[in-house]
Image (cartoon, rainbow, N blue to C red):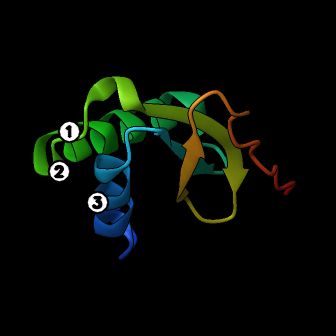
Amino acid sequence: MGCDFSPNREAFAKTLFSNPNLTGYLVVYTKFGKGKTHADKVSSFAVKDLIKNFKIPRIRLKALYGGNREEPEIEFWLVPKGSIPPKPILNKK
């Protein structure tokens, strides 16, 4: 998909796996012109990777579309169960 995970992917997965009281959120931002459809493909790839390579249960991962940025990005968030999910910060062109 042309998406390169940040170096903290492993730390994110290990922390999430070891603490059942956390939910992992992936906030996907696409380059201007790509949109939500592309973000859905990227987030699907990222979630499958975390499930396969780090054994994270699917129910503990959520993906959000954050909007557009000059460059595509993925943010990893660890949120206590029952807390408000992260709010994407929109970037206007």
Residue 15 against residue 1 in the figure, above or below: below
- Check if mark 1's residue and mark 3's residue have beta carbons within 8 Å: no
- Check if mark 2's residue and mark 1's residue have beta carbons within 8 Å: yes
- Check if mark 2's residue and mark 3's residue have beta carbons within 8 Å: yes
Indicate which disc, 2 or 3, sits on the residue closer to the N terminus: 3
Q: Secondary structure at mark 2?
A: helix
Residue 83 against residue 32 in the figure, above or below: above
Residue bearing mark 1: 51
Circle 3 crowding by C-alpha within 10 Å: few under 14, some 14–19, many from 20: some
71 or 27: which is nearer to us? Answer: 27
Q: Position of residue 82 (x, y in %)?
A: 64, 27
Q: Secondary structure at mark 3?
A: helix
Labelled disc at residue 54: 2
Q: Amino acid at mark 2?
A: Phe
Quadrant placement of the C terminus: bottom right
Q: Position of residue 3 (x, y in %)?
A: 35, 58
Q: Position of residue 72 (x, y in %)?
A: 55, 59
Labelled disc at residue 91: none
Q: Secondary structure at mark 1?
A: helix
Residue bearing mark 3: 14
Quarter holding residue 36: top right
Residue at 32% x, 45% y is 46
Residue at 38% x, 48% y is 19
Q: Is residue 36 left or right of residue 12?
A: right
CA separation, marks 1 and 3?
12 Å
Quarter holding residue 87: top right
Q: Amino acid at mark 3?
A: Lys
Q: Amino acid at mark 1?
A: Ile
